[in-house]
Amino acid sequence: MPFLSDSLSRVKPSPSIAITTLAGELRAAGRDVIGLSAGEPDFDTPDNIKAAAIKAIEEGKTKYTAPDGIIELKRAICDKFQRDNGLSYTPEQVSVGTGGKQILYNALMATLNPGDEVIIPAPYWVSYPDMVRLAGGTPVIVEGQLETGFKITAEQLEQAITPRTKWLIFNSPSNPTGAGYRADELKALTDVLMRHPQVWVMTDDMYEHLVFGDFTFCTPAEIEPGLYERTLTCNGVSKAYAMTGWRIGYAAGPKELIAAMRKVQSQSTSNPCSISQWATVEALEGPQDYIETSKEAFVRRRDLVVDMLNQIDGVTCPVPDGAFYVYPSIKGLIGRTSPAGTAISDDEAFAKALLAEADVAVVHGAAFGLSPNFRVSYAASDDTLREACRRIQSFCASLR
Ligand SMILES: Cc1ncc(COP(=O)(O)O)c(C=O)c1O
């Protein structure tokens, strides 16, 4: 009898966490490695949010809470959805979890049976397919291409739907590409979903506030109110307020689904950290100027990185609409050889050689389901990004 579970055998560890850990080890061994593999803002959590956490500790708000969140936070989340997305929810329709990741995981655990299919547009956030597998479902990958701005079309979605399709996981702006669906593009997808009442939408709006230029964020239940009863709108404070370590994510949707997710959470983590919940009340209800300040920095960094990567012969780097990632294609480099003799046969070989020979850590495209590409997280200082792009430029120029 195997000791480890069958469901675990279907899952691989997060590649971005693995590369970030390796970069940390190399740095500890004295190498001057620049890490652009982690998906977290390099800014500190705003002071008003930290102060709210300290106040919560001093006031003794340090005990268990309701499994899926304190009422004060649920009310703040309802206000946020109304204010930012025009969506009306009551606190019973809201779930708070230990990060956006746990929210998505709870929803999949609460709903998937063996054989249930979940449509995941690629390139996707690394965790979606593995979370689906862990919950016993089957990921169905639909590829967006460089030529379509990394977005899927209505026709592709229509073709992927079967009677066993339970969810579409939708993420815009996307990790890893930063691509965002405009209202008309999203409407084309929701029109398809309206014809298939068995399909629910899990929308991961984690990068809602990190959108640039004339791009306007939109979310499925807002674009198609007919989907409200079968949409779980997920979000969190990790990226928007530089709170990755606080571990708070949240979602709103139909009461029955929220109750089922509560059951999963009550038998796993019990409740998200009480102190972080109070800090999140302040994040959502307090001054919002951090969002604009961080956005300015991210636009500047995006432009710097896109510009420097596009100067490389063999690399094509599209301009993303949001988030803090770029996802350049290295099609023109495949088949070359590095100075140390590594054959650049695919994007994984490229990322490994870049780390080994040029001390820059990025994540290879295969991890996100679309190759040959790599993901750069530009949540780093301008100077660090400039130096990293210089190293990538000279590494690519050295390939023969
Ligand atoms: C698209 C997307 N969804 C969810 C998450 C998870 O966020 P959290 O740190 O709140 O669990 C991430 C984090 O990288 C992400 O990129």
Image: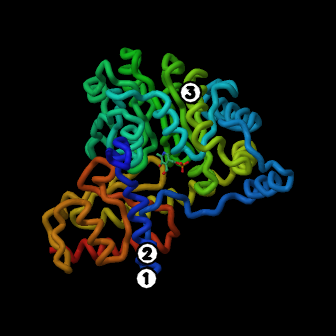
> What residue is pinned by disc 1?
29
Structural crowding at the residue carrying mark 1, measured as other residues with C-alpha within 10 Å and reported as few (<14), some (14–19) or many (≥20): few
Query: Are the residues flagged by discs 3 and 2 in contact, CB closer than 8 Å?
Result: no
The three-letter code of the residue at mark 3 reads Ala
Instruction: Give the residue at the far right of this rendering.
Output: 59
Question: Against 341, is 68 above or below?
Answer: above
The three-letter code of the residue at mark 2 reads Glu
What kind of element bears circle 3? Answer: helix
- Measured as percent of width and height from the top left, residue 382 is found at 50, 69
- Measured as percent of width and height from the top left, residue 217 is found at 51, 38
> What residue is pinned by disc 2?
25
Q: Quadrant of residue 294?
A: bottom right
**Quadrant in which the N terminus appears:** top left
Q: Nearer the viewer, residue 193 or 267?
A: 267
Callout in the foreground (3, 2): 3
> What residue is pinned by disc 3?
260
Q: Is residue 87 left or right of residue 225?
A: right
The three-letter code of the residue at mark 1 reads Ala
- Measured as percent of width and height from the top left, residue 181 is found at 42, 37
